[in-house]
Image (cartoon, rainbow, N blue to C red):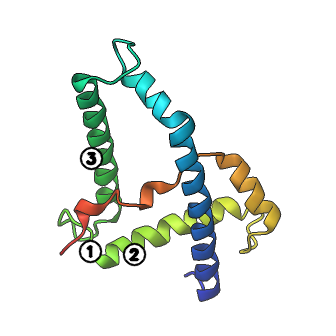
């Protein structure tokens, strides 16, 4: 069981990392992310995405979203009703935050030093951890 102090530390680290990663991710979209996407789906190499190419892009995003949703449901939908309850979503968030914290806490002492934090940022580079922002919308019980 994680102590309250460790949970607070994990939550704080996740918020800081999420903010930094979100900023880096936004910069990446403006300076290369869109270009890389355009290059991947621009099959006729005219520098633009036509309607058919945009449809392929949307289908790819939809498939990726469906795969992530299925993965989350398989792992966290304890009652197997095809939706994540608030408690199941909390379990998912806690599990993910704990894993992120463990990756940062290289020496396993339950604390993340500034050096460990910086090293973790270096390892993850400009990758966005935006998975938590809206990717599980369709799974919530209303």
In which quadrant of the rendered image does the N terminus lie?
Answer: bottom right
Residue that lies at the very extreme toward the right in this rendered image? 115
> Is 77 above or below relative to 50?
below
The residue under label 3 is: 66
Locate residue 17 relative to residue 131 in the image: left or right.
right
Q: Which residue is mark 1?
A: 85
Pointers 3 and 2 in contact (CB under 8 A)? Answer: no
Nearest to the observer: residue 9 or residue 16: 16
Up the image or down, 123 lies above or below 130; here it is: above
Q: Position of residue 139 (x, y in %)?
A: 24, 63
Mark 3, residues whose alpha carbon is within 10 Å: few (<14), some, or many (≥20)? some
Give the labeled residue for mark 2.
90
Q: Earlier in the sequence, mark 1 or mark 3?
A: 3
- Does the residue at mark 1 contact the one at mark 2 (Cβ under 8 Å)? no
| Residue at 31% over, 32% down | 57
Q: Earlier in the sequence, mark 1 or mark 2?
A: 1
Q: Secondary structure at mark 1?
A: loop
Residue 99 coordinates in the image, percent (x, y):
56, 63
Q: Mark 1, residues whose alpha carbon is within 10 Å: few (<14), some, or many (≥20)?
A: some
In space, the residues marked 1 and 2 are separated at their CA atoms by 9 Å
């Amino acid at each position: 069981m994680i102590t309250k102090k460790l949970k607070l530390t994990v939550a704080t680290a996740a918020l800081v990392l999420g903010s930094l990663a979100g900023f880096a991710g936004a910069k990446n979209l403006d300076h290369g992310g869109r270009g890389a996407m355009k290059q991947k789906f621009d099959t006729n190499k005219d520098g633009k995405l036509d309607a058919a190419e945009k449809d392929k892009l949307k289908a790819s995003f939809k498939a990726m979203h469906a795969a992530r949703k299925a993965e989350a449901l398989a792992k966290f939908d304890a009652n197997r009703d095809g939706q994540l309850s608030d408690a199941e979503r909390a379990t998912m968030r806690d599990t993910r935050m704990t894993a992120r914290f463990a990756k940062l806490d290289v020496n396993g002492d339950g604390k993340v030093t500034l050096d460990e934090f910086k090293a973790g940022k270096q390892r993850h580079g400009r990758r966005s951890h935006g998975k938590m922002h809206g990717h599980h919308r369709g799974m919530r019980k209303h």
